[in-house]
């Protein structure tokens, strides 16, 4: 939590929520698991896939619920017959108080930070820690000038006292590769990190219908530029560096490809990009929420500092790295060493990206490098990550067989 006026409001909200937090610690717990993602506004990320696994498993020892503040998500899951609760409802209120376990993908505000104060919180993440987050991100600013260090210390103090967003009981990881960074980011003990694999990676091992899209698919999924100071429209800046929509359209027609851009959720609704793609039939904005579905249909991924390329390694298809703003981004966000030697061509402008795309489609030269990195960062490649996490939950001492229920 960075010290700012916005987070002063968060502190105020925390103080107002103290009675509910106390109530959350006093209410007896039952074998209920609540799931959520993206501050309760979306149905995606790792918690979604673990939720679907738990519901399909239909274990009588647990009751599982997705908790949301979104009417669209509520209606979608209700129409599917899946157990879902409105965050601001009496039934949701009581069930969250009774929940023994909470599964999230970002912070406890994916569900509720106060009502779940007595629950065991399992952080599944919404990506791999290629960039520093949480305390690790704050530590990145601990060696600056006097003012910067002062803000760092105040931020750490505020986070420790008022904020549960960086404090979890357990965190999942795909391998030992990320353990040190997770310990720094979340200030969590090593024995609280579960090496199980990531829930949504199970999707790559499931059979699915073939893509209906004609031709080949190129996907560009840039990460956020939220922390780059002095940028009024950070995402649009990526379409500088020699980007020419007409030229790219001609290349796509020649290669029989379609180019999809998926916004990071912090940049959704960037009107400048919509205008840039207008009148170019091969340049499209991806409308779906879940990036995994797009990856399954992608022939060549264009990636930057997003960890999405790590998920894509399961398919062993070409990746082109667009590291246009590498130096300022590394300074602002502190990137891990995975991108020191990426398993694909590194491009510094769109002309190089277009050349790399053609080469990747004609002759894939990086297959062995991708397989080596996949082996390095994933302990498991069997499609059973959700099963391992679920069994870990069942093995916790807090698990009480037969003690389950909620408000009907």
Image: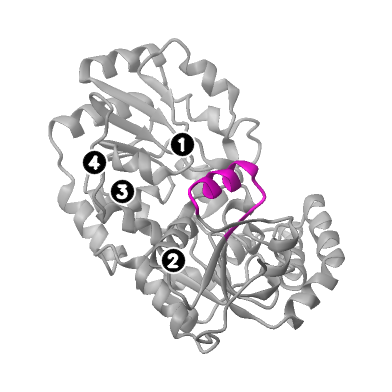
Image-based side of 312 in relation to 285, left or right: left
The residues tagged by marks 2 and 4 sit, at their Cα atoms, a distance apart of 33 Å
Residue 225 visible, this orientation: no
Q: What's the colour scheme?
A: one colour
Between disc 2 and disc 4, the foreground one is: 2
From the viewer's perspective, is residue 75 above or below residue 233? below
Q: First in sequence: mark 2 or mark 4?
A: 2
Label ID, residue 318: 4
Magenta span has 67?
yes
Does dot 2 land on a helix, a strand or a loop?
helix
Label 3–label 2 contact, CB within 8 A: no
Q: CA distance from mark 3 to mark 2?
A: 24 Å
Up the image or down, 261 lies above or below 390; here it is above
Q: Check disc 1 and report its element: helix, strand or loop.
A: loop
Task: Report if residue 302 lies within the magenta region.
Answer: no
Frontmost of labels 1 and 4 is 1
What is the number of callouts on the image? 4
- Judging by the rendered image, the residue that carries numbered circle 1 is 288
Give how far apart the Cα atoms at labels 2 and 1 are: 23 Å
The residue where tag 2 is placed is: 54
Q: Is residue 61 visible to us here?
A: yes
Secondary structure under tag 3 reads helix
Look at discs 3 and 2 and give the one toward the viewer. 2
Q: Of the residues tagged 1 and 3, which is closer to the observer?
A: 1
**Lower sequence index among marks 1 and 3:** 1
Q: Is residue 251 above or below residue 191?
A: above
Q: Residue at x 58, y 28 (%)?
A: 270
Residue bearing the label numbered 3: 312
Which residues fall within the magenta stretch?
Answer: 66-81
Which of labels 2 and 1 is toward the front?
2
Crowding at label 2, few (<14), some or many (≥20) Cα neighbours within 10 Å?
A: some
Q: Pointer 2 and pointer 1: residues touching (CB < 8 Å)? A: no
């Amino acid at each position: 939590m960075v010290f700012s006026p916005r987070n002063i409001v968060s502190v105020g909200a925390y103080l107002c929520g103290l009675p509910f937090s106390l109530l959350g610690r006093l209410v007896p717990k039952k074998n209920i698991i609540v799931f959520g993602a993206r501050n309760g506004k979306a149905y995606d990320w790792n918690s979604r896939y673990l939720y679907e696994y738990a519901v399909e498993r239909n274990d009588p020892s647990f009751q599982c619920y997705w908790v949301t503040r979104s009417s669209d998500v509520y209606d979608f899951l209700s129409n599917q017959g899946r157990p879902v609760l409105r965050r601001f409802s009496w039934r949701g209120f009581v069930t969250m108080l009774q929940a023994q376990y909470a599964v999230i993908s970002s912070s406890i505000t994916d569900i509720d930070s106060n009502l779940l104060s007595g629950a065991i919180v399992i952080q599944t993440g919404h990506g791999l820690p290629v960039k520093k987050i949480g305390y690790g991100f704050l530590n990145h600013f601990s060696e600056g000038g006097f003012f910067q260090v002062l803000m760092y210390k105040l931020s750490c103090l505020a986070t420790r006292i008022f904020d549960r967003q960086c404090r979890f009981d357990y965190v999942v990881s795909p391998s030992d590769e990320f353990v040190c960074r997770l310990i720094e980011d979340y200030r969590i003990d090593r024995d609280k990190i579960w090496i199980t694999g990531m829930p949504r990676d199970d999707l790559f091992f499931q059979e699915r219908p073939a893509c209906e899209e004609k031709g080949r698919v190129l996907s560009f999924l840039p990460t956020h530029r939220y922390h780059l100071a002095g940028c009024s429209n950070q995402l649009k800046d990526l379409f500088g560096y020699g980007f020419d929509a007409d030229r790219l359209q001609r290349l796509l027609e020649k290669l029989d490809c379609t180019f999809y851009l998926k916004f990071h959720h912090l940049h959704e609704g960037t009107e400048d990009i919509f205008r840039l793609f207008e009148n170019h039939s091969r340049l499209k904005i991806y409308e779906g929420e879940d990036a995994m579905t797009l990856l399954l249909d992608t022939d060549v991924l264009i990636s930057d500092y997003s960890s999405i390329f790590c998920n894509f390694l399961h398919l062993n298809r070409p990746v082109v790295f667009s590291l246009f703003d590498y130096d300022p981004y590394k300074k602002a966000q502190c990137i891990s060493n995975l991108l020191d030697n990426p398993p694909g061509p590194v491009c510094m402008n769109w002309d190089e990206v277009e050349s790399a795309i053609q080469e990747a489609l004609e002759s894939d030269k990086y297959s062995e490098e991708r397989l080596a990195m996949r082996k390095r960062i994933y302990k498991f490649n069997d499609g059973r990550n959700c099963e391992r996490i679920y069994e870990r939950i069942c093995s916790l001492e807090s698990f009480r067989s037969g003690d389950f229920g909620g408000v009907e």
